[in-house]
Image (cartoon, helix red, strand yellow):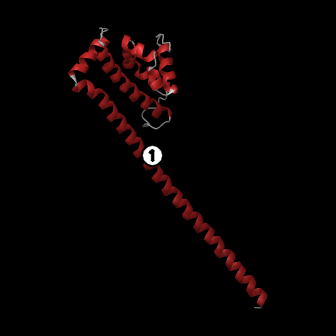
């Protein structure tokens, strides 16, 4: 075999080995992508679970105020019964409602961003509408209605406020922000 034939043979072996190296590299990369995808899925499941847990903790904190404070529970009951509240009671009731709406705003944005668990496919305004039977009763109180329309709503993100006001309008509740 002459020098040129030997060089040709080495070139052919090099191309063959190079082709095998490309295939091995592609198999390795496919395996790495698959592992990364599985790790990402696991991380997403854990993050979603953590968000649900944090939401539940927030919800429990909101309502534990009523469970642990008899005076606040009395104020709450009287406000929903449309009884008059003194200035201090109004502040306490508004603080409770503000905390509840903060919880609801959190759920609103988690659902809108598809961050909460897959079992809840409702998003944004839809989830605000689902909560309406409860928060709608709060909004019907004179104390909350006055607070919401005279600047209380400014404590929340405008997108959430629009969703709340849209649901109120659909329910026939006239809310005019000042």
Q: Residue furthest front?
A: 87
| Residue at 61%, 71% in the rendered image | 21
Quarter-of-image position of residue 82: top left
Which residue is situated farthest in the top direction here? 83
Q: Which quarter of the rendered picture does the N terminus lie within?
A: bottom right
Query: Label 1's element?
Result: helix
Identify which residue, 11 or 80, lies in the foreground. Answer: 80
Left or right: where 86 falls relative to 165: left
Q: Position of residue 123 (x, y in %)?
A: 49, 29
Is any atom of residue 141 visible in this view? no
Location of residue 175 in the rendering, given as x and y in whole percent from the top left corner: 48, 12
Image quarter of residue 120? top left
Front-most of residues 14 and 94: 94
Asked whether, in this view, residue 84 is left or right of residue 106, the answer is: left
Q: Is residue 29 left or right of residue 5?
A: left
Local crowd at mark 1 within 10 Å, few (<14), some, or many (≥20)?
some
Residue 16 in view: yes
Residue drawn at x 31%, y 28% as measured from the top left: 62
**Residue 129: which quarter of the image?**
top left
**57 left or right, relative to 126:** left
Q: Report the front residue among 155 and 139.
A: 155
Location of residue 177 with respect to 52 vertically, above or below: above
Q: At 49% from the left edge and 26% from the top edge, which residue is drawn?
A: 160
**Compared to 109, does 25 lie above or below?**
below
* Residue ID at (25%, 20%): 72
For this orientation, the residue located farthest to the bottom is 2
The residue labelled by disc 1 is 44
């Amino acid at each position: 075999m002459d020098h040129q034939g030997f060089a040709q043979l080495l070139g052919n072996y090099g191309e063959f080995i190079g082709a095998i190296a490309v295939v091995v590299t592609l198999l390795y990369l496919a395996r790495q992508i698959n592992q990364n995808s599985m790790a990402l899925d696991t991380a997403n499941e854990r993050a979603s679970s953590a968000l649900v847990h944090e939401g539940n903790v927030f919800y429990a904190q909101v309502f534990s105020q009523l469970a642990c404070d008899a005076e606040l529970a009395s104020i709450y009951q009287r406000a929903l019964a449309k009884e008059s509240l003194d200035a201090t009671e109004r502040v306490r009731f508004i603080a409770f409602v503000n905390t509840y709406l903060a919880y609801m705003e959190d759920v609103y944005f988690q659902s809108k961003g598809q961050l909460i668990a897959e079992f809840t496919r409702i998003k944004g305004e839809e989830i605000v509408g689902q909560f309406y039977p409860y928060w709608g009763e709060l909004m019907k109180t004179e104390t909350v209605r006055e607070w919401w329309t005279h600047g209380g709503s400014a404590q929340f993100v405008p997108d959430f406020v629009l969703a709340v006001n849209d649901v109120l309008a659909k329910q026939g509740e006239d809310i005019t922000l000042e």
